[in-house]
Image: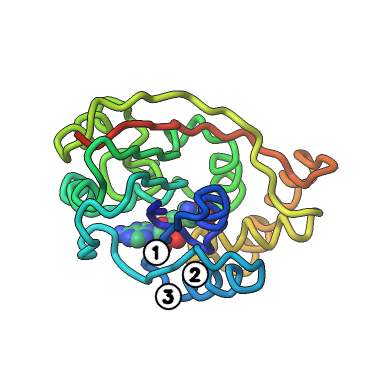
Amino acid sequence: MLDIGCGSGRTTLAAARSAAPGSALGVDLSAEMIEVARQAAQREGVPNARFVQADAQIHPFPEQAFDVAVSRTGATFFGDPVAAFTNIARAMCPEGRLVMLVWQPFDRNEYIVAITAALAAGRDFPRPSPYSPGPFSMADPARMRAVLTEAGFSTPNVASCTEPMYFGRDPQHAFQFMTGLARWMLDGLDDRRRARALEALRTSIQAHLTARGAAYGSAAWLVTTTRR
Ligand SMILES: C[S@@+](CC[C@H](N)C(=O)[O-])C[C@H]1O[C@@H](n2cnc3c(N)ncnc32)[C@H](O)[C@@H]1O
C-alpha cells in the first residue's frame, strides 16, 4: 500500500495495521513530517509501516509494486498532475486501486472560509485557484477526471463527503493549530491589525465550540479508481 503525501503518517499507520502481513509505504516531501511518522510507527509498534522522504511526482518507485494507493488531501500539490499521477500509476499493479480524499471548492469548506475571513483583517485575499497546485486543485470533478484518465486510471467515482472538522481539544489548542495552519495570512499586518485578526479568530473559535473542540464544516471528494 502506498500513502501519497502521508504527512505525519496517521493514515499510513492505519493502512499498515489493516494490511498486515502486507505493508504500507508513506511518502512525503517533508523530512520533518517523515521523522514524526517514523517515530510514531516505532512508538506504536507498527513495523510494517515504512516511510520515505520523496517527491511523489518523480520518485522512482518500483514498477507495479503497490496494489492500493491512498491519499488524504496529499495529492493536490503537483506542478504537473498528469505526470505525477502517471508516475504513481506506474508504481501500481494493473487493476490496483487508488483512493483519495481531495478538497471540494474553497467556498464549501467553512473552516478555511472562517480562518481566512478572520485573519484577512479587512484585506481582500484572492481565492485559491482550482487550477493551480494547492489544496483545491482537484476540486473540479471534471478536471480531476481528465487528469486521472490521462494518467492511466479508469474514470473515477467521485462521492461527496461533508463532515464536521474538529480543531483542538480546547479553544487554546484550536487557536494554536489554526494560526499554525494559516500563519502566512498574518504576514504584512501591523501590530494593531494583527491583534484584531487574532481576536477575530478567537471569537470564531468560541462560536464553533463543541465538547470535541471547535467544529467547522468541511467538504471533500472521495475519489476511487483503478489503474488501467
Ligand atoms: C494537507 S497535508 C496531508 C497530510 C496527511 N495525508 C494527513 O492527512 O494528515 C499534505 C501533505 O502532502 C505533502 N506533499 C505535497 N506535495 C507532495 C509531493 N509532491 N510528494 C510528496 N508529498 C507531498 C505535504 O508535504 C504535506 O505533508
Residue at (50, 58) in percent of width and height: 185
Residue on which the image places disc 2: 33
Residue lying furthest right in this view?
A: 211
Residue on which the image places disc 3: 31
Residue at (72, 44) in percent of width and height: 204
For residue 136, side relative to residue 14 (left or right) = left
**Looking at the rendering, in which quadrant would you find the C terminus?**
top left
**Crowding near pointer 3: few (<14 within 10 Å), some, many (20+)?**
some
**x and y percentages locating residue 39 in the rendered image:** 58, 75
Mark 1 beta carbon near ligand 1 (under 8 Å): yes
Q: Quadrant of ligand 1?
A: bottom left
User: How far, Cα to Cα, is label 1 from label 2?
Assistant: 7 Å
Res. 59 image quadrant: bottom left
Query: What is the three-letter code of the residue carrying label 2?
Result: Met
User: How far, Cα to Cα, is label 2 from label 3?
Assistant: 6 Å
Looking at the rendered structure, the number of numbered marks drawn on it comes to: 3
Query: What is the three-letter code of the residue carrying label 3?
Result: Ala
Residue on which the image places disc 1: 28
Res. 199 image quadrant: bottom right
Judging depth in this view, the residue of 78 and 193 nearest the camera is: 78
**x and y percentages locating residue 81 in the rendered image:** 22, 47
Judging depth in this view, the residue of 24 and 109 nearest the camera is: 24
Proximity of marks 1 and 2: CB atoms separated by less than 8 Å: yes
Mark 2, secondary structure of its residue:
helix
Proximity of marks 2 and 3: CB atoms separated by less than 8 Å: yes
Judging depth in this view, the residue of 191 and 41 nearest the camera is: 41
User: How far, Cα to Cα, is label 1 from label 3?
Assistant: 7 Å
